[in-house]
Amino acid sequence: MENRKSFFHLHLISDSTGETLISAGRAATAQFRGSLAIEHVYPLIRNRQQLQPVLQAIDEKPGIVLYTIVDQELADHVAERCREIGVPSVNVLEPVLASFQAYLGTMTRRRVGAQHALNAEYFKRIDALNFAMDHDDGQLPENYDEADVVVIGISRTSKTPTCIYLANRGIKAANLPLVPGVPLPESLVRATRPLIVGLIATTDRISQVRGNRELGSVAGFDRSHYTDRANIHEELKYARSVCAHHQWPVIDVTRRSIEETAAAIVALRPKLR
């Protein structure tokens, strides 16, 4: 009985992409054990005509309503209709904007999608994402000194998703798999610009993740060797020795989310904050 999950409808209304709401909704839901949200996301809602079917959907499947709508009249209409329907609603950005306005002493512009402006920061993130994709899994090692971060580790330590997440923060990240018996590229050893950090996890965790990976069609692939705990233990031992020899920091990702791993990497190099 203790493992039974309860479900509730979570309606997310945004005049932009809805990313802010999705993050806020999931962060809040995670604090309630046993409760799972059925998400209904309504992006790019900018007038009453677009809003009408959304309100109808809320009426048919009542639940919690979160919204980010900068048009005050439209936002007030959402709040009013939610009161009539009898469901709780929260304008997620409004308390934040009010605090900023009070402290800064200026009025908000209330411009839709202002956080997605095509400015220098946006293009920096795109550039970093292209860099991460071009330098995934040991590709183009000669460019390591152009990176902000180089992530190294044995297979299944979440190197690629970590680099992609860092790229979304404008950080150029490359990754390199560590394989016993395969020497490191000289370009990595000589690199002076990037932070080089090793990722590790427990033997059991890596074996579990590797066991769920579909690689049976790869020529010469030996699943038993790939998931064998003794072999993984030796791989991890090698990874630790490499990092210790070069005095590169190591992060254990066993119980870390991708976001937490990326935050730990950023914290290791203050100039990336």
Image (spheres, rainbow, N blue to C red):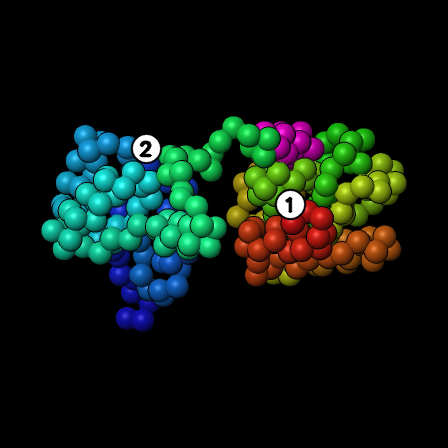
Image label count: 2
Q: Amino acid at mark 2?
A: Leu
Tell me whether the residue at label 1 lies in contact with that at label 2, contact meaning CB atoms closer than 8 angstroms.
no
Apparent side of residue 157 relative to residue 212 in the rendered image (left or right): right
Apparent side of residue 198 relative to residue 126 in the rendered image (left or right): right
Q: Is residue 136 magenta?
A: yes
Q: Nearer the viewer, residue 273 or 77?
A: 77
Q: Nearer the viewer, residue 43 or 150?
A: 43
Does residue 255 appear in this view?
yes
The residue indicated by pointer 2 is 44
Apparent side of residue 3 relative to residue 80 in the rendered image (left or right): right
The residue indicated by pointer 1 is 159
Question: Where is residue 54 drawn, in percent x and y?
Answer: 20, 39
Q: Residue at x 24, y 53 (%)?
A: 89
Does residue 223 appear in this view?
no
First to last magenta residue range = 123-137
- Residue 151's tag is none
Apparent side of residue 128 relative to residue 14 in the rendered image (left or right): right
41 lies above or below 219: below
Crowdedness near tag 1: few (<14), some (14–19) or many (≥20) residues, C-alpha within 10 Å: many
Q: Is residue 5 magenta?
A: no
Lower sequence index among marks 1 and 2: 2
Q: Amino acid at mark 1?
A: Lys
Question: Where is residue 218 drawn, in percent x and y?
Answer: 62, 34
Q: Residue at x 54, y 54 (%)?
A: 257
| Distance between mark 1 and mark 2 Cα atoms | 34 Å
